[in-house]
Image (spheres, rainbow, N blue to C red):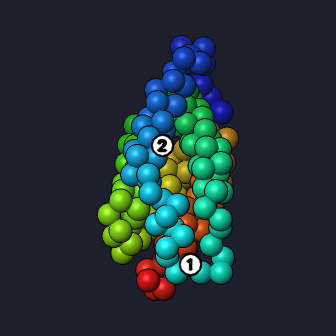
Amino acid sequence: MTTIPGRSRAPLALLPFLAAVAVVAVVGGLAAADARSVYSGLDLPSFAPPAWLFGPVWTVLYLGIAVSGWLYWKSGGERRGLAWYAAQLVLNAAWTPLFFAGGAYGLALADIVLLDVAVVVTALYFRRSSRVSAALLLPYLAWTLYATALNLAIVVLN
């Protein structure tokens, strides 16, 4: 990984990435105020995780997403990669209000499919400048693909 002079000594630059991810988490948290009751009221597939698992998983994933973006920026990655990074954050933020607050399971499915694509494209851009930043997105991609299958099953079952 190459770093741009001045960016290599910019640990405070991690803060905007943490803040952006925190905004996504807060939007999700506010929209998911009744998530446990909504989730428990759905017909779920056999592979559905317990509701308590989502919080810890997303906490770890959000930290990885923030560090990934910071490492990419620090390595001098292209603006287009950062644009895809921002796009996947917006799609991520939109999913919870669509699914839990709106009960729009089909629209949430469309959103999460676009999110999957955006995470893949983001990781491909990030890989050009920082393999570590791309690798940090892989658990996120795995979880969103799993969540996509879960969302699809919920659309079918409900």
> Would you say residue 138 is visible in this rendering?
no
Disc number for residue 85: none
Name which residue lies at 50% across and 55% down: 119
The picture quadrant where one finds residue 118 is: bottom left
Considering every residue shown, the one lying at the far bottom of the view is: 156
Indicate the amino acid at tag 2.
Ala
Residue underneath mark 2: 25
Q: Residue 144: image x %, image y %?
A: 55, 61
**Disc 2 on helix, strand or loop?**
helix
Indicate the amino acid at tag 1.
Leu
Q: Residue 44: image x %, image y %?
A: 56, 78
Q: Residue 112: image x %, image y %?
A: 44, 64
> Would you say residue 59 is visible in this rendering?
yes
Disc number for residue 44: 1
The picture quadrant where one finds residue 1 is: top right
Q: Nearer the viewer, residue 131 or 94?
A: 94
10 Å neighbourhood of mark 2: few (<14), some, or many (≥20)? many
Q: Nearer the viewer, residue 155 or 6?
A: 155
Name which residue lies at 36% across and 75% down: 106
Q: Nearer the viewer, residue 122 or 3?
A: 122
10 Å neighbourhood of mark 1: few (<14), some, or many (≥20)? some
Position of 108 relative to 86 (above/below):
below
Q: Residue 158: image x %, image y %?
A: 44, 83
